[in-house]
Amino acid sequence: MTSVRKLAAAMTHYQECDVLVVGGGPAGSTIAALLAQKSRRVVLLEKERFPRFHIGESLLPLNLPLFDRLGVADDVRRISVYKPGAELVSDEHEAVATFRFADNPLLSVGYSYQVKRSDFDKLLLDNSRRLGVTVMEGTRVTDVILDAADRTTVTAIGSDNTPTQWSTRFLVDASGRDTLLAGRLGLKRIDKQNNTAAIFGHFRNVPRQVGDKAGMITVHLFEHGWVWVIPLPDNVTSVGVVGTQALFKARKGKLDAIFADAVGKCPSLARDMTNAEPLSPLVACADYSYDSRSYVGERYILVGDAAAFIDPLFSSGVMMAMSSASFGAGVVDALLEGREPREHLVRDYERKIQTSLASLSWLIYRINSPILRDVLMSTFDLFNTRHELITILAGDFYERRSFLSPLRRLQFAYGFLLFASKLGFRLRHGGIKWRPQ
Ligand SMILES: Cc1cc2nc3c(=O)[nH]c(=O)nc-3n(C[C@H](O)[C@H](O)[C@H](O)COP(=O)(O)OP(=O)(O)OC[C@H]3O[C@@H](n4cnc5c(N)ncnc54)[C@H](O)[C@@H]3O)c2cc1C
């Protein structure tokens, strides 16, 4: 700490709390609520005023037990579209693969929800208030001093430019992709293998699935990426293109043109979008994956996207944000209490995050590879993997994979087909066929 900062700190009046949470997205409001339930004095500072737009609208079944724990299960159901599973469409393969959560008896919950994040995030934030958290919206954290003797000091600025100072026993960074601490402490590692970008928007007049597919997320695959179609409440449909650099370089230009180009590459989607009416201008963001070299420090913890972010292909973000927040609440409470050995708590927390990233990244890195696409879209289920993969797609990321887990079997199948492809064979609808080079 510089001497000027030390002097300023000595002269300032700090408001005190046990835990200060930066950010009121799903990770921040979950950890704040769970710690308030344990009678901690929790303050949450959020730079925006809710409701505010956010991307990340398709949830996973294993989110639901967390809604029960927070006491919001009925409220979430009220603002959602019921999601029975996911559908993968490849016009190149002229095939549709359907993943229905209820088909897997190992899953305790057989469905999930699609939500407008503005409503969902507000609901969770208001619930944390109800549970006793002091929530200040329109308040941006601008400075953090971690090296004071036994407390951390935080400076924030309100929307009327009034500064506030806080002294906290523990700091939670739930600042999302702003990565407040990982950025400042030089801990952030960008994953160069996953370097994609996304363009998305909300539309009306997009036809909806009916019958037992009503409410599913549809993912359309095309050469340099994929497009999500998510049915939201009030007949709004969220459509987003996620593409590799090749897509964006090949079509330098306006967002609308890149978006239309990608939609045009998926004829079945292009048909559905013929009469689509955009509700606002398209939004773009780089959605490259990253993580942090470490997730817990002396008196701080990183949760949700502030700790790690992985490509949205499997709609895993909110589930990972809320579950890391739930694990994190246990860590913070035990550390404040001095209950368990610190090293054990930290190692366990870090292992959980790393296992979840590892479970998903293998699939994400290969989603644009023709071989993985052939496996996912084939009419037969090579090595009986598809059915059980649903447990990963439902949010079960935290178990270490056994030798013959579905993911491992899929990896074997992939290796086998990669070898076959070098000999000129390629998986086609009915089996492995010779493909002239
Ligand atoms: C293109 C794309 C598509 C996605 N699709 C899905 C999907 O379908 N399903 C899914 O589950 N996930 C999806 N995600 C991921 C999802 O958006 C995130 O994983 C999720 O929002 C993480 O929650 P969080 O609470 O960690 O962060 P956030 O939701 O980003 O919340 C962080 C909060 O911190 C606040 N904040 C930041 N800095 C400060 C500061 N200095 N002071 C005070 N407040 C601050 C922000 O205003 C924000 O409200 C997608 C992501 C992208 C990029």
Image (cartoon, rainbow, N blue to C red):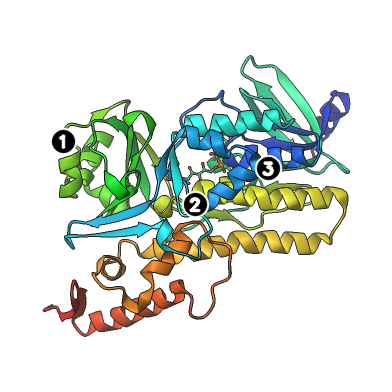
Q: Nearer the viewer, mark 3 or mark 2?
A: 2
Q: Residue at x 43, y 50 (%)?
A: 312
Among the 4 quarters of the image, the one containing residue 176: top right
- Would you say residue 183 is visible in this rendering? no
Q: In this view, does 201 lie to the left or right of 359?
A: left
Whichever of labels 1 and 3 marks the residue nearer the N terminus, that label is: 3
Q: In this view, does 403 lie above or below 372?
A: below
The percent position of residue 146, horizontal first and vertical second, equals: 77, 42
The percent position of residue 152, horizontal first and vertical second, equals: 80, 39
The percent position of residue 275, horizontal first and vertical second, equals: 17, 31
Whichever of labels 3 and 2 marks the residue nearer the N terminus, that label is: 3
Whichever of labels 2 and 1 marks the residue nearer the N terminus, that label is: 2
Q: In this view, does 283 lie to the left or right of 183?
A: left
Of residue 261 and residue 234, the one placed in the foreground of this image is 234
Check disc 2 and report its element: helix, strand or loop.
helix
- At label 3, the amino acid type is Ile
Task: Find the distance from the CA under tag 1 to the CA under tag 3.
Answer: 43 Å
- Pointer 3: residues within 10 angstroms few (<14), some, or many (20+)? many
- At label 1, the amino acid type is Thr
Q: Mark 1 points at which residue?
A: 274
Check disc 1 and report its element: helix, strand or loop.
loop
Identity of the residue furthest to the top in this view: 160
- At label 2, the amino acid type is Pro
Q: Residue at x 55, y 47 (%)?
A: 64
Query: Quadrant location of the C terminus?
Result: bottom left
Query: Quadrant location of the N terminus?
Result: top right
Q: Mark 2 points at which residue?
A: 61
Q: In this view, does 31 lie to the left or right of 230?
A: right
Task: Find the distance from the CA under tag 2 to the CA under tag 1.
Answer: 32 Å
Q: Mark 3 points at which residue?
A: 31
